[in-house]
Image (tube, rainbow, N blue to C red):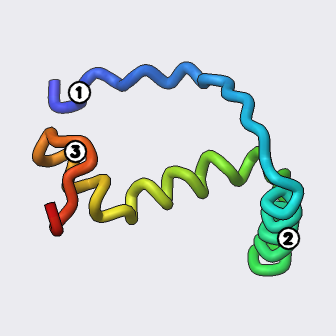
Amino acid sequence: MKLAKLPDRTPVKMSILLTPSLAQRLREYADFYAETYGSKEEVAELIPFMLEAFLERDSDFRRSKRTGRPGETSSS
């Protein structure tokens, strides 16, 4: 079979506390998203995708995953 076994897709619920200013910025981001795409989404729906995009673009984090050395950066 060419298709690998699908990964675990069971959602994991996490609770976090936000500063009031960050909560406001996230609401503003959701408004900006709605203006941009014409589709209103709740902040809670956007956050997983925002975090995924952040992690994908963090070059130091990606590098540490390749080397197997947590926290290692290009200056280490």
Instruction: Determine which residue is flagged by label 2.
Output: 28
Of the two numbered discs 3 and 2 on the same chain, state the one appearing first in sequence.
2
Q: Amino acid at mark 3?
A: Lys
Work out whether residue 46 or residue 60 is closer to the camera in this orientation and state it: 60
Q: Tell me if residue 65 comes above or below residue 4 in the rendering.
A: below
Look at the image and tell me whether residue 45 can be seen. Answer: yes
Work out whether residue 7 or residue 21 is closer to the camera in this orientation and state it: 21
The image shows residue 22 at horizontal and vertical percentages of 79, 60
Instruction: Determine which residue is flagged by label 3.
Output: 65
In whole angstroms, how far apart are the C-alphas of marks 1 and 3?
A: 21 Å
**Closer to us: mark 1 or mark 3?**
3
Work out whether residue 41 or residue 59 is closer to the camera in this orientation and state it: 59
Q: Is residue 74 left or right of residue 23?
A: left
Of the two numbered discs 1 and 2 on the same chain, state the one appearing first in sequence.
1
Q: Amino acid at mark 1?
A: Ala
Quadrant location of the C terminus? bottom left
**How crowded is the residue under tag 1: few (<14 C-alpha within 10 Å), some, or many (20+)?**
few
Q: Amino acid at mark 2?
A: Glu
**How crowded is the residue under tag 2: few (<14 C-alpha within 10 Å), some, or many (20+)?**
few
Q: For numbered disc 3, what is the local secondary structure? A: helix
Determine the residue located farthest toward the bottom in the rendered image: 36
**How crowded is the residue under tag 3: few (<14 C-alpha within 10 Å), some, or many (20+)?**
few
Q: Is residue 23 left or right of residue 62?
A: right
> Residue at the location (28% across, 60% down)?
60
Instruction: Determine which residue is flagged by label 1.
Output: 4
